[in-house]
Image: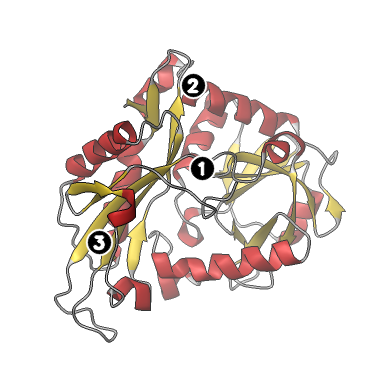
Amino acid sequence: MAASQGIRGEAIWLDGTFVPWGDANVHILTHTLHYGLGVFEGIRCYRTDAGASAVFRLTEHMRRLYESAHINLMQIPFEQAQLEEATLECLRRNHLEEGYIRPLAFIGDGEMGLNPGNNPVRVAIVVWPWGKYLGEEGLERGIRAKISSFSRHHVNSKMTKGKTCGDYVNSILAKREALLDGYDEAIMLDTQGLVSEASGENVFLVKDGEICTPPLPTVLAGITRSSLIEVAREKGITVVERNIGRDELYLADEVFLTGTAAEVTPIREIDHRQIGAGTRGPVAKALQSAFFDIVAGREAKYQRWLTTV
């Protein structure tokens, strides 16, 4: 079920205090609502085999939230450790063993116009249950994708290292176009025509046993992306970060996406062209298995990536 359809919890952390879910409101003149300058993160909590709940790479996600704010000249009025503890407490108060976590820093009401002036920077943390973003079937069988008619942002037009709220209008347009055309996801090219990202995920291809992915200067530094690169290299798989043309996707043995929401999702078809065998390939399957072992707490060497609730 999509996150927007009837999600509800008990409490939301807002500006340092917990408020009842239905009371977490903002003024209609909230600056971010009008102009889109805010920053956010997407984080997941998993129930481990030991019975505890653990957040995947909480510190790294929160660090990126502060980096996104810095890029956008926003000063978050809380220490990172406070937001990390508030995240854990939010999960506890909502009795959520597994789910999605959304920290959001936004500019409140006050001045209008493009310059927010002295408007306060406000912070919220919301948690809710959220299943497989692209579906259980998509994880096993692979999804269908299309090359979007919308280009990804130029590196100097939106600064690709920040997760900035307004930037995702670009993603929404691409995603809706793909869905309206009968696909599951969009793959976006940069302004030079090279493969960039999906609407909300990083892109990987496999060819002759080697993994390739677009380099960081033009894409978001995905935390699941970096995790899977480390895991793949630990398994002895070569990972190369380089420019990729769209036709290389068509000719790949495998293509898969990574992201907090999508986790590790294979692509079986792009633009009516079958990818490899037309199903989840062995590399994607191995990385999926490794990823779900890690978040379930079954891999001791990666316990450092888990924060127990």
Q: Is residue 71 left or right of residue 232?
A: left
Report which residue position mark 2 lands on: 296
Near mark 1 (Cα within 10 A), the count class, few <14, some 14-19 or many ≥20, is many
Disc 2 crowd rating (10 Å Cα; few below 14, some 14-19, many 20+) is: many
Is 65 in front, or is 161? 65
- The residue under label 3 is 70
Taking the spot 65% from the left edge, 66% from the top edge, the residue there is: 176
Q: Residues within 10 Å of mark 3 (few under 14, many from 20)?
A: some
Please tell me whether residue 1 is drawn above or below residue 300 in the rendered image. below
Under mark 2, the amino acid is Ala
Residue 80 coordinates in the image, percent (x, y) = 20, 45
Q: Secondary structure at mark 2?
A: loop
- Label 1 sits on what residue type? Arg
Cα–Cα span, label 3 and label 1? 22 Å
Instruction: Say whether disc 2 or disc 3 marks the residue closer to the N-terminus.
Output: 3
Residue under the point 33% across and 65% down: 38
Q: Nearer the viewer, residue 64 or 218?
A: 64
Label located before the other in sequence (1 or 2)? 1
Task: Determine whether 182 is above or below 31 in the image.
Answer: above
How far is the residue under mark 2 from the one under mark 3? 33 Å
Q: Can the viewer see residue 147 in this picture?
A: no
- Res 23 label: none
Q: Quadrant of residue 309?
A: top left
User: Mark 3 vs mark 1: which is more N-terminal?
Assistant: 3
